[in-house]
Image: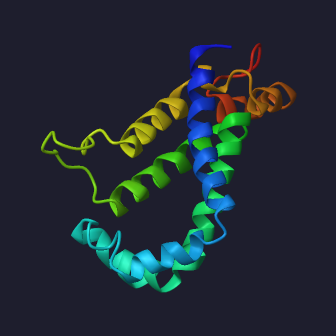
Amino acid sequence: MNGMVWVRVLVGAVWLNGAVEKLLNPEFPQQFATSLEAGGFISVAPPFFQGFMQGTVAPNAELFAQLMRAGELALGIALILGLLTNLAAVGSVVLSLVIMLSQGGVRLGMGLGAPEFLTVNVLVALISVVILLSPAAKALSVDAVLARRSPGLSPLLTNRRARGGT
């Protein structure tokens, strides 16, 4: 197993861990809604993102909480198995950026607390771009098996042309 496969699986494990924590907490949707009602996330979000949080997320907080559970679970499973890896990597970038924005975005910290520039969400987004662009990340995956069975799908699934093909 090459290093990029490990990277893909570990990023998948990060998403799966987040999903399992949310799934094991039956109160998560209500806690998320309560946090939004109290101004959590919205007050720290960048101004351009606050409107979306106030107008769309807050009124539908419990639905968005369920979408977070499902999204994190789907990304985790897809990345661990290497199933539609490129799509999962794009989803990982998008969800990482949404979470990052809801937590205040990127800024330089004061050096007294947790990093505020290279946060976990920024790192997951950047690593997900590497997974997206890396053919090596698709080795030992469901995508590789599908690409061998249907060589025409190989460029889409594995970022490689089919062997001996076009």
Left or right of 151? Residue 51 is left
Q: Is residue 94 above or below residue 4?
A: below
Q: Nearer the viewer, residue 164 or 76?
A: 76
Q: Is residue 5 above or below residue 17?
A: above
162 relative to 150 in the view: left or right = left
Look at the picture and state if 129 lies above or below 106: above
Q: How is the image coloured?
A: rainbow
Q: Does residue 112 appear in the picture of this structure?
A: yes
- Identify the residue at horizontal 37%, vertical 76% (top origin): 52
Residue 61 position, x and y percent, is: 51, 78
Q: Quadrant of the C terminus?
A: top right
> Which residue is located at x 40 percent, y 45 percent?
121
User: How many numbered discs, if any?
Assistant: 0
Compared across the picture, whether 8 is left or right of 107 comes to right
Quarter of the view holding residue 36: bottom left
What is the quadrant of residue 11 in the picture? top right
Viewer-proximal residue, 14 or 166? Answer: 14
Residue 57 placed where, x, y %? 46, 77
Q: Give coordinates of residue 139: x percent, y percent.
A: 69, 21
What residue sits 63% from the left and 22% below the top? 5
Q: Quadrant of the N terminus?
A: top right
Most extreme residue toward the right, as rendered? 149
Is residue 135 something that shows in the picture?
A: no
